[in-house]
Amino acid sequence: MTRVKFWGVRGSIPTPGPGTAYYGGNTSCVEVRSGDEIIILDAGTGLRALGAALMAEFKNQPLNLTMLLTHTHWDHIHGIPFFAPIYNPKCRLRILGCVGARKGLVEALTGQMESTYFPVPFAKVPGNIEVEEFKELNFDIGPFVIRAQRANHPGLCVGYRLFTPDGLICFFPDTEPRTGGDDREMIEFIRDSDVLIHDAQYDAAEYKTHMGWGHGCVDDTVMLALQAKVKHLCLFHHDPDHDDEKIDRFVKHARQIVRKRKGKMKVDAAREGMTIQLGGKS
């Protein structure tokens, strides 16, 4: 059985408060487990709660983790200094990201923990951390076969396709579907996904003033997923100005699009604590 659990679903900046209590205010972080393998997708502020849960579960046992970063914008890395396992000498954390950024991956991650910003330097944490920039976009991690592809987002940003023993998961938290353009490569990459976690930050009106920012309009995201015959679409990277009621309207609108197209795709908005199981009941 493969399990997907959402620990952070928000985009740009954490947004705590009563208006976001249902979907959650923490930024991008998703846990994927299959057997003994644990993969963490992105390291936004949702990573803190995941770290606390892992420490409670594994206690004094060795802990081996792999983290796949889509890119190094703040909302995808600023949970790392607060991730409890990195302060545990029995933890081995392998962090992977794409090679070719203007600053190297190590420099980007250590920079946010310099003394100007944080009291404990990255190099001094007791955990065993390996940072790797992958050059090949195809690699294996335990039972997972991973592929990466460039996303349509400013700077160097990728999304991931995870072939698991129980199904296909695709993760594109920051990407802008090409409205009226050629999205054939993306459609083929996410085709037949059992679960697609995809940027849907804006509604159609908001998107008009945010074109080129590298984030998706819910209408375009739904159409992209329908063309790719996705089974379950999870709207992700919720705008910090969107409260729970606004996101509820996004879900209702997205499901209406699916019905009008006579599709069978399931649509949800990702929320903190939500779990999806492949090879078992959700």
Image (tube, rainbow, N blue to C red):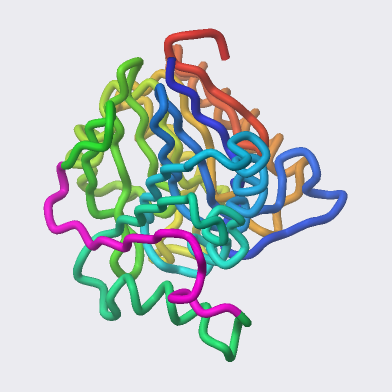
Residue furthest to the top in view is 280
Within the image, what quadrant is residue 54 found in?
top right
Q: Is residue 180 above or below residue 108?
A: above
Q: Is residue 138 left or right of residue 23?
A: left
Image location of residue 229, percent across then percent down? 32, 21
Query: Can residue 206 be seen?
Result: no
Residue sitting at x 39%, y 41%: 171
Q: Which residues are the magenta region? A: 120-138
Q: Residue furthest right?
A: 18
Which residue, as the protein is rendered here, is positioned at the far left? 136
Closer-to-camera residue (114/235):
114
Whether 131 is among the magenta residues is yes
Give 173 or 50, whichever is nearer the viewer. 50
The answer to whether residue 127 shows anywhere in this view is: yes
Instruction: State how many labels appear.
Output: 0
The picture places residue 49, in percent across and down from the top left corner, at: 67, 48
**Residue in the picture at 35% in, 53% down:** 94
Res 250 → quadrant: top right
Q: Residue at x 57, y 48 (%)?
A: 203
Examine the structure image and report whether residue 9 is included in the region drawn in magenta. Answer: no
| Residue beneath the point at 67% across and 39% down | 56
Left or right: 68 in relation to 116 = left
Front one among 20 and 200: 20
Against 58, residue 102 (above or below) is below
Q: Quadrant of residue 7?
A: top right
For the N terminus, which image quadrant?
top left
Question: Up-down: is 122 above or below 277?
Answer: below
Q: Position of residue 60 (x, y in %)?
A: 59, 42
Out of 73 and 35, give the one closest to the viewer: 35
Figure check: 153 above or below 200? below
